[in-house]
Image: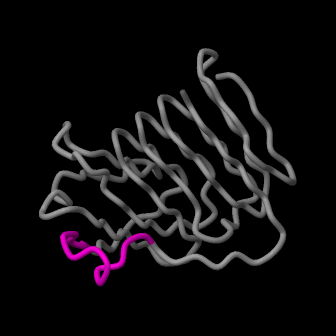
Amino acid sequence: MVAVAAVLISGAVIASPLGDSKKDKASVAKDVTIGADYYKIVIDDDIDLALVESNKKDMRILAKGNTHEDVSWKIKDGVLYLSSNGSSLKDKVKITLTVNKLRQLIVNGASNVHSVGYLQSPGISVTINGDCTVALQNRGAIELKHTPDADMEVTSSSGAVYVRNK
């Protein structure tokens, strides 16, 4: 089953980044500075991803013990690829990632993706493959694409939200 929540709200949203080392003592945070621009993100495997609009290019990986090392990422041709290596991650890795006017998001597997506050993209295309959850707030349009056999539910939306089969 694929669950999708696309939310466009015109008010302010207050949220905190994923993970609080004071509350979760078994988790280890790893901060990464990303040196290249990216406008598209492809996520594979079991990852909880929080997107934060910013001009910075940062990523924080929060995982149990040293499992943050099981997360691989690379940027190629403006695409950021994020994945967990194999099934060694019993608990989903939590990643907080800064984005700047994200254009496209592809979510594969059992990942969860949400925005922290509003994204500032004029339009985001979101493609869903697998048992994932997506909850985004964006100032511009959101286009949702999914496989024909996917069960999908838009729990709330306002503004320009389009749903299409791939």
Q: Position of residue 120 (x, y in %)?
A: 70, 67
User: Residue at position x 74%, y 47% from top?
Assistant: 142
Q: Residue furthest bottom?
A: 22
Report the side of 9 relative to 74 (left or right): right
Q: Quadrant of residue 2?
A: top right
User: Residue at position x 41%, y 52% from top?
Assistant: 80
Q: Is residue 74 above or below residue 26?
A: above
User: Residue at position x 50%, y 29% from top?
Assistant: 129
Q: Is residue 123 above or below residue 62?
A: above
- The quarter of the image holding the C terminus is top right
- The quarter of the image holding the N terminus is top right
Report the side of 94 relative to 150 (left or right): left
- Magenta stretch: dominant secondary structure: loop
Q: Is residue 108 above or below residue 125?
A: above
Q: In the rendered view, how is the structure colored? A: one colour
Along the line of sight, the residue nearer the viewer: 108 or 77? 108
Report the side of 142 relative to 126 (left or right): right
Magenta residue check for 96? no
Magenta region, residue range: 18-30
User: Residue at position x 78%, y 49% from top?
Assistant: 156
Q: Position of residue 118 (x, y in %)?
A: 68, 68
